[in-house]
Image (cartoon, coloured by chain):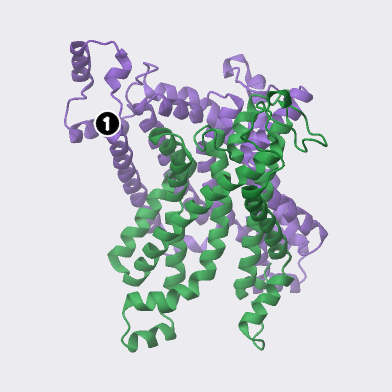
Chain colours: A green, B purple
Amino acid sequence: MSAGPLATPVEESVLRLALKNRSFVIGLVITGLIAAMALISFVWTPYDITNLIVANRMKPPSGEFLFGTDHFGRDILSMIMVGSRNSIAVAFVAVGIGMAIGIPLGCWAAARGGWIDEALMRFNDLVFAFPALLSAVMITAIFGPGAVNAIIAIGIFNIPVFARVARAGAMALWPREFILAARASGKGKTQITIEHILPNIVSMLLVQGTIQFALGILAEAGLSYLGLGAQPPMVSWGRMLFDAQTRMMVAPYLALFPGMAIVITVLGLNLLGDGLRDVLDPKLRRER
Amino acid sequence: MTAFLLKRLLIGLATLLVASMVVFGVMEVLPGDPALLMLGMNASPDALEALRQQMGLNDPVVIRYLHWIGGLAMGDFGRSYTYSSPVIELIGERAAVSLPLALMSLALSTLIAIPVGLYAASRRGRLPDTLAMGTAQIGVAIPNFWFALLLIYVFAVWLRLVPAGGFPGWGAGIWPGIKSLILPAVALALPQAAILARVTRSALLEVLGEDYIRTARAKGMPRRTVLWRHALRNAMIPVLTILGLQFAFLLAGTIIIENVFYLPGLGRLIFQAITQRDLIVVEGVVMLLVATVVVVNLLVDLAYAVVDPRLRVRT
């Protein structure tokens, strides 16, 4: 394992390394394009998807409708653009829930140790024993299908993930000299956690966040595909696949394009996460 | 090692116990009266009350919980409200589809992933490695149910090689049964294989950097022998961990795939039971799945000991 470049200032070297990392650059470009598409959809889409034109229904891809139209005559490309907002929003908020609850829990467990730590980690194991997808299906089926319940269902299972990562990172830091120095200077555990622990584990959490974001997109798609996520008139990629499945035989393009949108987005996020980890974690640099 | 396994066993049992309380508690607070569900909306209040009494629904929560958990321990999962047959029978029927499906896709993903991971690691940084890992990156990003739709379109609708969905039952013969499980198994296996190949590769690369590998090479052992005898064995621990997680995921993860292919498996059973508020079925299947996760984790712990003799003496 190499120690990484020591001569150059840290920030400069990280940025230069990032731009040299193929995964990171490709991931950043893809994620950027998807984000741009979602933003553009607020002001412009090729067609208005709230305007149902029956004469245009089930048109295969052509110069006029690039990705074809659905059973209501809506342009698939425009729907993918609008749908990206909801798919992204669901995954984003679900990651936010996981971070907002998981990180403080993990830091608390690491700072306190003892039975609190043990209890929290056993509780984590318990949550992990429930298959996440199954539980998300149960939550949405029982509390009613919809985007909000999908966010909660996905978010709950992000909590133990972030708690575990935060705890592992914090546990490795607590015995270090600079933490000891902070304690000797009379700082409390909360203050140390905020001033010294968090800044040092933020990169780990960011990498995990990207991965969970990608998983969230997949989970939203799965739930909506079962009819448990976004409900019409709300458009999401998973919901588009739900509508497409009964028309697969006559119009496979209905399923093809939303699925590709999911694959490209998840791919971009995963590449970004991989790249970030390589860049931010010098220990792994030579191994990959 | 015995102490280690005993500790894991106890933790597993405790997890099951707490999980049963959680499952029972959640089902308890849900709206929906099983007696009303069985008799229909037009049932007379007297008949309802009598059935509630008979089903023990009027007993205190703790009594009902103990009754339920006692039954579970004896293999009695109760009776389904909607199918009016014992839950254990339903589970048995459906597991006859889900279990072979999970095993098929696990076998498939392992058979693809380990050689690919091994090959990529041995050609690290070169074209085959880049290609294999690029493919794996895409494989991880593909939702399995979408891949399933594509498979149906190509192999069932277009080429007409296999049925698009449904399950003839094992009574119709082994081959027709297996034939209808091929596409679902492939759809489930692809993302799993992609993850497993990546884990295998990185675990191998880590091991290949160790001193004993260099020693083995230095004393003249051929690359291939070093890779298979020393490296792969030592890289097995993370691979086994992921395999264990994947099997548990496969059993539950079939919930979407079984819906795509209209397979009468555990996933569809629980999906239908949830929508029909057949809570006793939901409770039974969830407990079974949690128990599977716990047992698989224990087996993985055992497998560590088989792969790594050092673990047998430690603690």
Q: Dot 1: what SS?
A: helix
Can residue B240 be spotted in the picture? no
The percent coordinates of residue A77 (x first, y second) are 71, 40
Residue at image mark 1: B68
Q: Which residue is drawn at the image coordinates 31% and 42% (left, top)?
A: B22
Answer with left or right where residue B301 lies relative to residue B213: left
Q: Subunit of mark 1?
A: B
Can residue A244 be spotted in the picture? yes
Q: Examine the rendered structure and indicate whether residue B264 appears above or below residue A197.
A: above
Answer with left or right where residue B87 lies relative to residue A94: left
* Mark count: 1
Quadrant in the rendering for residue B281: top left
Sort mark 1 into few (<14), some (14-19) or many (20+) by Cα contacts within 10 Å: many
The percent coordinates of residue B261 (x first, y second) are 61, 26
Q: Amino acid at mark 1?
A: Trp
Quarter holding the N terminus of chain B is bottom left
The percent coordinates of residue B314 (x first, y second) are 44, 65
Q: Examine the rendered structure and indicate whether residue A288 appears above or below residue A3.
A: above
Q: In front: B228, or B138?
A: B138
Answer with left or right where residue A63 lies relative to residue A187: right
Q: Examine the rendered structure and indicate whether residue B88 appears above or below residue A282.
A: above
Q: Which residue is drawn at the image coordinates 39% and 25% (left, top)?
A: B88
